[in-house]
Image (spheres, grey):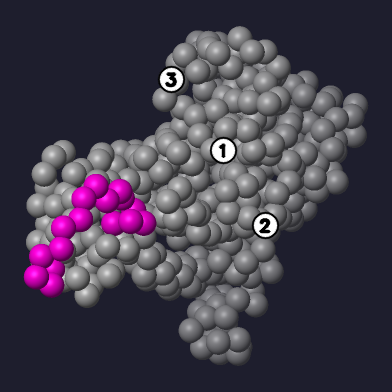
Amino acid sequence: MQKLRQTLRVRKERAILVAAILRARNDSDDLAELTALAESAGAIVVDRFQQKIRTISATTYIGKGKAIFLDKRVKRFKADVVIFDNDLSPRQIRELEKIVKVKVLDRGELILDIFATRAKTKQAKLQVELAQLEYTYPRLTRMWLHLDTVAGAGGGTAAGAVGGIGTRGPGEQQLEIDRRLVNKRITQLKRELVNIDKRKIREIDGRKGLFKICIIGYTNAGKSTLLNALTDADVFVEDRLFATLDTRTRKWTLGGGAEVLLSDTVGFLKNLPHQLIASFKATLEEAINADLLVHIVDVSNPDALNQIDSVNNVLAEIGCGESPILLVLNKVDIVRKVSDLEMVQTLLPDAVCISAKTGLGLEQLTDVVSARYKGSELLLRVSSSQSDGRIQSFLRAYGRIVKEQYLDGSVQIDATLGRNQLPGLKRLHPEDIEIIQT
């Protein structure tokens, strides 16, 4: 039985998907998203199995009778793995594997598997490994023997290795050794990620004075495509879930020569494992510290409104629930029914409709973001030395000069300026600023 879970990967394995739904709840699940997740992980979906249940079984989640029925389907379709669209306890996984005699994964483990295959940078790999270890720690069944090479405080030598001389009692169970190995590795990963967090915070702090915009949204909504369309970022784009995990930041030039910083983030998903959200804290710092969140939505997806709710739930969990948000409805060019789009627009009247792929609506999006960037318009009277051309240049770049009057070496300028640009003007230290009209 231990051999069943030597690996959590599902690439090229024949998978049966299972969704158990409580009868008391009205929600339904057609397994479309779990299918996409499984295929993104490289599995071959051979069967789908949905079951309405009255209560959740503490041992098998779906009940022993349905578990036996599932075993027959496993044999019939020669499946290698069963993937549940539910979160299972370690006990439920163990009991199910005893019955079906193949590996059983839940939704969380599948998502972790996908993240593991997408991680390319050192930061992403550390984040995914930490999430995997924390998520699967309760499920330890002697599957972590590869960790016996993890170095302790003394480095890679035998004396410094975990479980070295003097650390193991003669009667210690292998499982206890495995748990100590995992705990040691978790501590090491957290230490490395803390250093990455500090560097990321310093990097973001270095951008003070620049307006920061972060693209967030459900996975595969078109975040990277939008970043490319607005900034020529040349970020990797592919029609699959979690195509990219690493944050990219580029300069975006708005109207009037104003520049902002535009970042994208890892895609969100409903029921994301909490360990992933915690371990990806450094990646999500861009969203946490943004002046504006651009929430991009795949409006061609029939489940778009529920996806918006899922993203909002994750935003609340990471502390961005009250951040300024601009909703952007993407992929309007492939919406099957115009009536569906009109319904969403009625429910979300302030949303901007675009197609990041074709460029439709990007000018309107730029105008809306530019207005958010500037803030409400003020009429100012600014006095400065005639020799200080920086103030006049700033007002011409970010506002509109209404009148100029030169008096004995100084200049008095009446100009309109966005409220959000006022701090930038004050940093130039004009002699006097008077707000004439708000």
Figure quadrant of residue 120: bottom right
Q: Mark 3 — residue?
A: 349
Where disc 3 sits, the SS reads loop
Q: Mark 1 — residue?
A: 362
Membership of 292 in magenta stretch: no
Residue 66 located left or right of residue 308? right
Residue found at x 28% / y 69%: 390
Q: Mark 2 — residue?
A: 234
As measured in the structure, the alpha-carbon distance from the residue carrying label 3 to the one carrying label 2 is: 32 Å
The 10 Å Cα crowd at callout 2, few under 14, some 14 to 19, many 20 or more, is few
Q: Earlier in the sequence, mark 3 or mark 2?
A: 2
Where disc 2 sits, the SS reads loop
Residue 404 located left or right of residue 286? left
The 10 Å Cα crowd at callout 3, few under 14, some 14 to 19, many 20 or more, is few
Amino acid identity at mark 1: Leu
Amino acid identity at mark 3: Pro
Question: Is any part of residue 33 visible from this angle?
Answer: yes
Residues in magenta? Answer: 395-410
Residue found at x 26% / y 39%: 376
